[in-house]
Image (tube, rainbow, N blue to C red):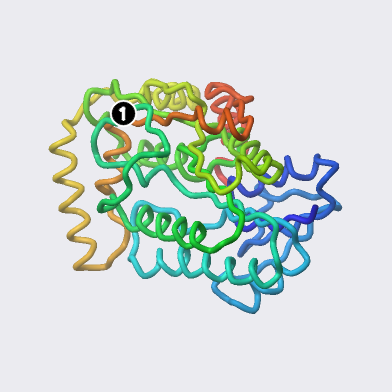
């Protein structure tokens, strides 16, 4: 099998590469991204790195050619940004890949989407894949990810879509580092009562789910799957644990969600009419820190054979060890 992996130089991408190379049935991996980072690089004879922009149709055609399977993990992923930027990165790129996949008769298209599609700034637990998505989404990222899903579902290609929740572990440059940076800048406060529960999913397990998807039997194809650890945690307990282990005293000051939401709305409004830079607070960002949110992963267990191998605490351990080494790099 010859695999094309987009987003290969990112957090999920390089951790997926680490697992792909160990499979005897995979002979070649074309790994694409925009830039190489020494912290997110895998050196192996099966891997060929090909750097470029997925909005370029000619580039996409060339990288899809001669591959059997696509794992599309590249995305513009942020709680803030213009709709046009998200549409280009998440929808137009998807359409480029779909067109090339059809032209070169790709056997299977595995797409990394997001459970942000379900998020509505309220407590929601044990959400399954039948959740109604005919609604206004919480931000442009979620809206364009859903549009990308629909494009793939309607393409006629064989597909599997996964919606992994809150990836953590070695190589994380997004979730936990953002919280640490907010703390170091004196901006981190407990939002709400500090008792909300959430899924924190080891990136190792998400990479495992992607590999299960490319080898899954036909009965599992043309389906959407939630991916998490199936063991929701008290979010602020885990954030406090990370901070303590990095020699920082966890915050104790609590701010009501309704108040911080209004402040975030004002900051978003101000950013839109001035410099359009990401505000210190976003409504989505404060919502994820205040509201309980967890996924039902029974479908992935049944049809994909998904079984989380790494616990949330083990993923935090590997993040801490990695972050100590790379904190200043």
Q: Is residue 299 above or below residue 89?
A: above
Q: Is residue 67 above or below residue 120?
A: below
Q: Quadrant of residue 105?
A: bottom right
The percent position of residue 71, horizontal first and vertical second, equals: 63, 53
For mark 1, does the 10 Å Cα neighbourhood hold few (<14), some (14 to 19), or many (20 or more) residues? many
| Residue furthest to the bottom | 58
Q: Is residue 36 above or below residue 119?
A: below
Q: Nearer the viewer, residue 100 or 16?
A: 100
> What residue is drawn where x is 14% and y is 45%?
262
> What residue is drawn where x is 22% and y is 56%?
268
Is 166 positioned to the left or the right of 288 in the image? right
The percent position of residue 93, horizontal first and vertical second, equals: 52, 67
Q: Nearer the viewer, residue 41 or 207?
A: 207
Q: Which element is circle 1 on?
A: loop
Q: Is residue 246 above or below residue 97?
A: above
Q: Quadrant of residue 313?
A: top right
- For disc 1, the marked residue is 292
Q: Nearer the viewer, residue 290 or 165?
A: 165
Is 234 positioned to the left or the right of 167 in the image? left
Label total for image = 1
> What residue is drawn where x is 39% and y is 23%?
240
The percent position of residue 104, horizontal first and vertical second, equals: 71, 69
> What residue is drawn where x is 74% and y is 61%?
49
The percent position of residue 22, horizontal first and vertical second, equals: 81, 40
Q: Nearer the viewer, residue 225 or 234?
A: 225
């Amino acid at each position: 099998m010859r695999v094309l992996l987009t987003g290969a130089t990112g957090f999920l991408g390089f951790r997926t590469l680490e697992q792909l190379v160990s499979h005897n049935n995979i002979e070649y991996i074309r790994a694409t991204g925009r830039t190489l980072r020494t912290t997110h690089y895998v050196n192996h004879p099966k891997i060929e790195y090909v750097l470029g922009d997925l909005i370029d149709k000619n580039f996409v055609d060339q990288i899809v050619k001669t591959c059997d399977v696509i794992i599309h993990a590249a995305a513009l992923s942020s709680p803030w940004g213009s709709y046009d930027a998200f549409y280009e990165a998440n929808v137009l790129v998807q359409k480029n890949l779909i067109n090339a996949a059809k032209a070169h008769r790709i056997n299977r298209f595995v797409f990394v989407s997001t459970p942000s599609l379900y998020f509505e700034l309220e407590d929601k637990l044990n959400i399954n894949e039948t959740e109604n998505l005919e609604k206004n989404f919480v931000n442009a990222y979620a809206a364009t990810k859903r549009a990308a899903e629909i494009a793939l579902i309607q393409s006629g290609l064989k597909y599997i879509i996964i919606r992994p929740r809150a990836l953590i572990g070695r190589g994380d440059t997004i979730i936990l580092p953002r919280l640490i940076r907010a703390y170091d800048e004196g901006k981190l406060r407990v939002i709400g009562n500090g008792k909300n529960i959430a899924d924190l999913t080891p990136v190792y397990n998400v990479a495992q789910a992607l590999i299960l998807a490319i080898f899954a039997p036909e009965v599992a194809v043309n389906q959407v799957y939630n991916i998490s650890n199936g063991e929701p945690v008290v979010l602020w307990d885990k954030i406090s644990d990370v901070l303590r282990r990095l020699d920082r005293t966890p915050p104790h000051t609590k701010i009501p969600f309704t108040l911080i939401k209004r402040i975030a709305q004002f900051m978003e409004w101000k950013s839109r009419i001035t410099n359009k830079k990401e505000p210190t607070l976003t409504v989505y960002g404060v919502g994820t820190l205040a509201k309980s949110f967890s996924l039902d992963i029974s479908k992935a267990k049944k049809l994909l054979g998904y079984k989380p191998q790494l616990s949330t605490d083990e993923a935090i351990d590997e993040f801490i060890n990695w972050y100590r080494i790379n904190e200043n790099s």
